[in-house]
Image (cartoon, helix red, strand yellow):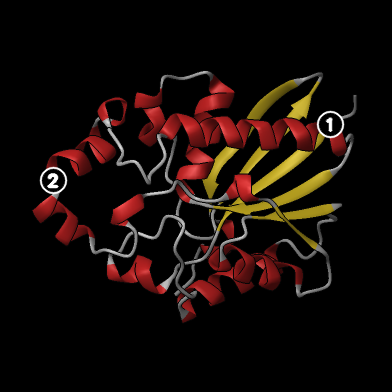
């Protein structure tokens, strides 16, 4: 098997990100800053050749993917790339959740191994499993190729936990994953190796 390069990209900043509102499987549009950062990333990657582009079906990811490709490549949507589903927290302000459901939210952010989601939500382990399955399928399909995957912050962290075989309590210690950041994986001889995590070279000296 030949080396496969996978560029994981978190979507650009959204209106709800800026408001401090949780999204999960719900959606909000990219902000002007989110679009600008996606354009800067597109320009930074302009000299690279990619063989496929995958995206979460969430609009914020698809908007980012469309900017990155200049709408010149087919974008393959895959539900496994969606963000963690957050049930009745979705669309609510974090400060409101902290007032009404603080213990569960603090488990979510500080002690993920204790996080007990409501029936309409996912566990971190479920996200890790579906992201791992997506990666496995990509490796089978794209021998020797370079691909882009536009997804979400928790989804990327959940995949990194799976790759490194870390306990779920380490999910927030995998590196900073901000909007339009790049995380690069190499798959060689059946081994997946993170090359870098959460890099933003396109935003250096950016205002």
Side of 126 relative to 172 (left or right):
right
Mark 2 and mark 1: span between their CA atoms? 42 Å
Observer-nearest of 31 and 123: 123
Which quadrant would residue 66 be assigned to in this image? bottom right
Q: Is residue 84 above or below residue 169?
A: below
Disc 1 crowd rating (10 Å Cα; few below 14, some 14-19, many 20+) is few
Q: Decide: few, some or many residues near mark 2? Use Cα within 10 Å; few <14, some 14-19, many ≥20.
A: some
In the picture, measured across the screen, residue 126 lies left or right of residue 191, that is: left
Quarter occupied by the N terminus = top right
Residue at figure coordinates x 55%, y 34% from the top left: 159
Q: Which mark is residue 118?
A: none
- Which residue: 51% across, 62% down? 204
The residue at which mark 1 appears reads as: 140
Q: Which residue is mark 2?
A: 102
Q: Quadrant of the C terminus?
A: bottom left
In this rendering, would 63 be left or right of 100?
A: right
| Towards the viewer: 190 or 93 | 93
Helix or strand or loop: what does disc 1 sit on?
A: helix
Residue 92 percent location from the top left of the image: 26, 63
Residue placed most toward the observer, 103 or 3: 103
| Residue 77 image position (x, y, % from top left) | 71, 56
Name the secondary structure under disc 2. helix
**44 in relation to 207, above or below:** above
Q: Tell how many labels.
A: 2
Residue occupying the far front of the picture? 119
Taking the view exactly as shown, the residue that stands out farthest to the bottom is 32
Dot placed on the residue nearer the N-terminal end, 2 or 1: 2
């Amino acid at each position: 098997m030949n080396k496969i390069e996978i560029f994981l990209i978190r979507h650009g900043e959204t209106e709800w990100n800026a408001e401090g509102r949780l999204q999960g499987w719900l959606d909000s549009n990219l902000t002007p800053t989110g679009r600008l950062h996606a354009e800067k990333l597109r320009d930074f990657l302009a000299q690279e050749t990619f063989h496929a582009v995958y995206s979460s079906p969430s609009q914020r990811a698809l908007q980012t993917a469309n900017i990155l490709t200049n709408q010149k490549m087919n974008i393959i949507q895959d539900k496994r790339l969606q963000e963690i589903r957050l049930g009745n927290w979705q669309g609510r302000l974090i400060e409101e959740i902290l007032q009404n459901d603080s213990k569960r939210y603090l488990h979510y952010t500080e002690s993920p191994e204790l996080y007990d989601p409501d029936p309409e939500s996912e566990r971190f382990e479920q996200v890790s499993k579906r992201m791992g399955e997506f990666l496995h399928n990509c490796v089978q399909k794209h021998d020797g190729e370079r691909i882009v995957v536009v997804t979400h912050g928790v989804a990327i962290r959940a995949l990194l936990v799976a790759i490194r075989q870390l306990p779920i309590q380490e999910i927030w210690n995998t590196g900073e994953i901000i909007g339009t950041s790049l995380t690069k994986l190499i798959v060689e001889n059946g081994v997946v190796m993170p090359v870098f995590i959460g890099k933003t070279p396109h935003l250096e000296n950016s205002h």
